[in-house]
Amino acid sequence: MKLVRASLCATLMVAAAMSANAQDKPFKIGVIDDMSGTFADNGGPGTVLAIQMAVEDFGGSVLGRTIQVLTADHQSKPDIGSSVARKFIDDGVSVLLPGGSSSVGLAVQAVARERAITTLVSGGYAPNFSTNQCSPYGTQWAPSTHELANSVAKAVVDEGGKKWFFLTADYVFGHGLAADASRAVKAAGGEVLGEARHPLNSHDLSSQLLTAQSSGANIIGLANAGPDLVNTIKQIREFNIKAKPATMLVYENNVVALGLEVAQGLRLSAPFYWDINDATREWSKRYMSRFNNKVPTMGHALAYIATTHYLKTVKAANTDDAKAIAKKIRELPITGDMIQNAKIQANGRVVMDMHVFEVKKPSESKGPADLYNRLATLKSEGLFTPADKSGCEHLVTQ
């Protein structure tokens, strides 16, 4: 009997030690983004700050474990992104947040899908994240090229911009945006006269712009983003090209880089802007106070919202198991007013209201952060593709 009691006591001590070690083990969030390259200002360090703010606002711990944020620069290379994802998973991360180049994000999500790890995509705009390359453990918070194009293109055509020529960044995001915008233009009664592609991070776009000018188009559709978009608009002005640029994905830092004198009149769509309501202003002012007064992009805000919702899900489910999270994350309501009427579809697509903005004239702006006028709010119904029509093979129902 004494031997049995001693054995039982030893077993309980080992179990207690294992429990204590589990409690000491940090809860790890992995951020794989462009930290120093083309898309660093759109996401990058700003995304890391937004995620850290979400962790702090949540209380710094979950499941009795201190939350730790790991970061890595994927350098816009899918092989590096995949390698880092595997390393992070081996190191015990519970969730991955890929950002920057969509091709890298898709590579990261593919690894996470194979290893049954949750992904939160707040900075990847290709539709593939929640269509043909979806993951049962992934949610796409960033609007895709489909929503971005359809929010803007129809209005441009309706106002007389009926002949389009596309300048397209030659990777998955650019291809998707050009294809979606072309469909939107044609559906609205316009026509597409041609397309010229350019490599990522191009500095000289003269050849593509001269081709666009000679096409007879009155609209140059910009299926690019970040510095490529900034360079394109600057060179359109420099070459005195008469066709107007039509933008569909513009970040606040792009407008700042261009200056209001050059950027005025550009249109864009986004689910977030810092000056929409009290909730966006309160959060953005806290963010800007910690980031050299830089205005947050929608990618930054969506990273905060996605991380917050994920941590609430982990707490409610009492686990970080990706299969359990996949169901619970769709079940819980997305709270707060930083984005409106948001919910998660079975394919992981987060649908929400989208706002259409126009860049202000210099005379309209009241300060460095006062960039946009809001023209319209578009409800998510009819704008986002329903899950059952998305082509996703990994639908998760509640």
Image (tube, grey):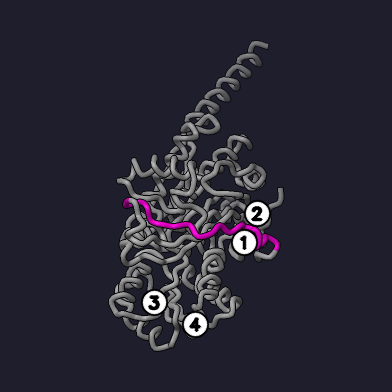
Q: Are marks 4 and 2 in contact (CB under 8 Å)?
A: no
* Label 1, label 3: how far apart the Cα atoms are: 28 Å
Position in image of residue 278 (x %, y %): 48, 41
Residue at point 56% right, 52% down?
Answer: 115
Res. 79 visible in picture: no
At label 2, counting other C-alpha atoms closer than 10 Å, the crowd grade (few under 14, some 14-19, many 20 or more) is many
Res. 342 visible in picture: yes
Query: Toward which corner of the image does residue 182 lie, by quadrant?
Result: bottom right
The front one of 116 and 256 is 256
* Disc ID at residue 345: 2
| Residue kind at label 4, given as amino acid type | Lys
* Disc ID at residue 163: 4
* Label 2, label 3: how far apart the Cα atoms are: 34 Å
Residue under numbered circle 3: 198
Quick one: label 3 or label 4, which is nearer the N terminus?
Answer: 4
SS at circle 2: loop
